[in-house]
Image: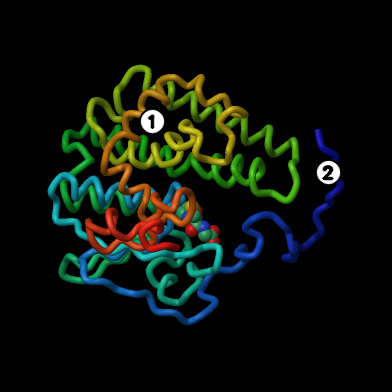
Amino acid sequence: MSDSRYTPPKVWEPKESGGKFASINRPVAGPTHEKALPVGKHPFQLYSLATPNGVKAGVMFEELLALGKDAEYDAWLINIGEGDQFGSGFVEVNPNSKIPALMDYSGDKPLRVFESGSILLHLAEKFGAFLPSDTATRVETLNWLFWQMGSAPYLGGGFGHFYAYAPEKLEYPIDRFTMETKRQLDVLDRRLAESRYLAGDEYTIADIANWSWYGQLALGRLYDAAEFLQVESYTHVQRWAKEIDARPAVQRGRMVNRTFGEPSSQLHERHDASDFDTRTQDKLGG
Ligand SMILES: N[C@@H](CCC(=O)N[C@@H](CS)C(=O)NCC(=O)O)C(=O)O
């Protein structure tokens, strides 16, 4: 175990902590600068980035459109590394300054929707899709949706932070959050051993939410940790992750507001279905 010599003072004071996201971390909320958000022509305005939480929203919109729903949307890039989430317009949509955030102009009055689980639930209810109507399956869908929302911070903010982003590799937190991440993968593996999708036979918002984190982790896309976590050993998670990954709407949704990876996989802004063919970074030369 590493030797930690830190003794907390009586009162905590902020200081430079290092690590990948140190420059955007603050101990207070609220905006840092005035900046209005852009608004496009569609009823839904998504402000996001293709992190696992952001991917959920892009996938949901593309799934709804694939079903033939009237869910056209503009997706605007929020660059969290540059502090866009602290602009005054963004904070009005999400006082928590995190992506994804959504404005829904489709009803009588504009609605702000923040928290990725809330976005999935709102859209599922609005369009009557990916949330089964029979009570038992609906409850099971919400069980796994809320399980994801409560569990993934241990994966992202815990394991991912200490394994990939902290300024030094510390054995105690890496061990602690690896243990929990593997336990969570096993929770999913056992459920998916008995069920095709998380809530039963139907693909739901619970799958979209969980796939974005645990499916992508199992496919080796998060933190370069596939071997360390032995993700191949979760065979039912693997089967489920690959099946969802093959869905055309998921492949499109992953590209929305993506600023990393192959240029052909990055669609920084999405305003029209044709953008996937014409406005990826390889085509724009960015
Ligand atoms: N519980 C939130 C978490 C969202 C979240 O943590 N978003 C991260 C990116 S994955 C973010 O915007 N971070 C910017 C920051 O912390 O300043 C949700 O599911 O929407």
In this rendered view, identify the residue nearer to me: 77 or 142: 77
Q: Is residue 184 above or below residue 118?
A: above
Q: Which residue is found at the position 62% from the left and 32% from the top?
A: 178
User: In the image, which disc is placed on residue 279?
Assistant: none
Please report contact status of discs 1 and 2: CB closer than 8 Å, yes or no. Answer: no
- Seen from the viewer's position, the closer of residues 129 and 51 is 51
Instruction: Report which quarter residue 246 is drawn in.
Output: top left
Q: Residue at x 60, y 64 (%)?
A: 24
From the viewer's perspective, is 191 left or right of 74? right
Give the quadrant of the C terminus. Answer: bottom left
CA separation, marks 1 and 2? 38 Å
Which colouring convention does the figure follow?
Answer: rainbow
Q: Which residue is mark 2?
A: 4
Label 2 crowding class (10 Å Cα cut-off): few <14, some 14-19, many 20+? few
Badge nearest the viewer, 1 or 2: 1
Name the residue type under label 1. Answer: Ala
Task: Say few, some or many: other residues with alpha carbon within 10 Å of mark 1 (under 14 / 14 to 19 / 20 or more).
Answer: many
Question: Label 2's element?
Answer: loop
Q: Position of residue 10 (x, y in %)?
A: 80, 60
Q: Looking at the image, is 160 positioned above or below residue 87?
A: above
What is the quadrant of residue 82 in the picture?
Answer: bottom right
Q: Which residue is the site of mark 1?
A: 241
- Dot 1 lies on which element? helix
Left or right of residue 217, residue 10 in this image: right
Taking the spot 60% from the left edge, 43% from the top edge, the residue there is: 158
Say whether residue 100 is visible: no
N-terminal of the two: label 1 or label 2? 2
Q: Is residue 30 above or below residue 7?
A: below
